[in-house]
Image: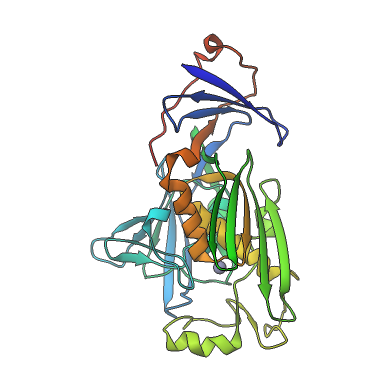
Amino acid sequence: MLNLLILKDNKNFPVQIVMAQQLRSICLVMGIRKLQNTIKHKVMVSGVGLHSGKTIHCTLHPATENHGIVFVRSDLASKPKIPAHASNVVRTQMCTTLGVEGAMISTVEHLMAALAGLEIDNVLIEVDGPELPILDGSSQMFVDAILKAGLKSNHAPKKYLRLKKKITVRNGDKWMVAEPSNSFSITGGIEFNHTLIGKQTFAFSENQNFQSEVASARTFGFIREVEVLHKNGFALGASLDNAVVLDEATVLNPDGLRFTDEFVRHKVLDAIGDLALLGMQIKADISIHKSGHDLHVELARKILENPANYEIVEYVGTPVHINTEEETADLPLVAVGAY
Ligand SMILES: [Zn+2]
């Protein structure tokens, strides 16, 4: 039996959800129809790996509907595939690392953010090393490469994970909260005891432009930490070309900052990239405070661990009024696999 649920409209389109009560993950959202996307042509991006210091080649290939985002370690004999999913995160120290049966790929977050920001659902990513190139420390060059390859529709409905319950994760004074919503927004907050950073907040929503507001915000670090990082085998490829670097009072990069609040914008970029590991775009209002990859991934896993926390929805076309079971009978109800 189908049951009709009317939710409030906060994005200028009616949000009427037909829920199949017995099948938790199937919903059709009457609104602007969106389809899954891939890229038109393969495209290669090369550059130094931030942590290994080695040159890495990364090739994005078009993929079919429902393929998802999948990494392949092309330098390993068995060419293992590593799906970009929160369940495959094996490390969150300094970056987000995915791994399957011992094969790992690190620093996926900036490419994942670029794919999420451009609404790419399906792509196969061959990488010939243990991490993605850091490029300029932001998502900008990934965005440029994807746009150069061109976007292509998969002609299949795009899936969204719509949060049903408030989910919170916390570690000391760091926290992250996701609240149910019919759209996506994220508000980031950071606090650093540095004259150029201090307290910063930045809000981004799906109505804003990822490319102009978020994509070019670079990762950042403090020069005093570089030596410690090097001793621990991190940031061997770090330079002023791939990060904002600060001393006690100033930015050392000759061209300065891209935004006065570039630091918090990059934190939002990281969170968008890590939340893309949910396997689809989330509909929720997200707030993050001093969080990092560990909390981003913990939140994604906490959402996914209980199917009652979310539902998977698909937009099915031009808004229409639905008020009886009979009128909904011909709608193309699509079964969506469990996550
Ligand atoms: Zn980052």
Instruction: Locate residue 202: give its quadrant.
Output: bottom right
Q: Does 31 sit above or below residue 41?
A: above
Which residue is drawn at the image coordinates 74% and 79% (left, top)? 196
Q: How is the image coloured?
A: rainbow
Residue 190 in the image: x percent, y percent? 66, 68
Which residue is drawn at the image coordinates 49% and 36% (left, top)? 312
Task: Specify whether 274 is left or right of 72.
Answer: right
Q: Does 28 sit above or below residue 201?
A: above
State ligand 1's quadrant. Answer: bottom right
Q: Residue furthest top?
A: 326
Q: Does 296 sit above or below residue 327?
A: below
Residue 240 in the image: x percent, y percent? 61, 82
Instruction: Locate residue 217: give its quadrant.
Output: bottom right
Task: Specify whether 13 is left or right of 314.
Answer: right
Which residue is drawn at the image coordinates 59% and 31% (left, top)? 33
Residue 73 in the image: x percent, y percent? 33, 63
Residue 287 in the image: x percent, y percent? 63, 55
Instruction: Locate residue 52: give its quadrant.
Output: bottom left
Q: Nearer the viewer, residue 222 or 189?
A: 189
Quadrant in which the C terminus appears? top left
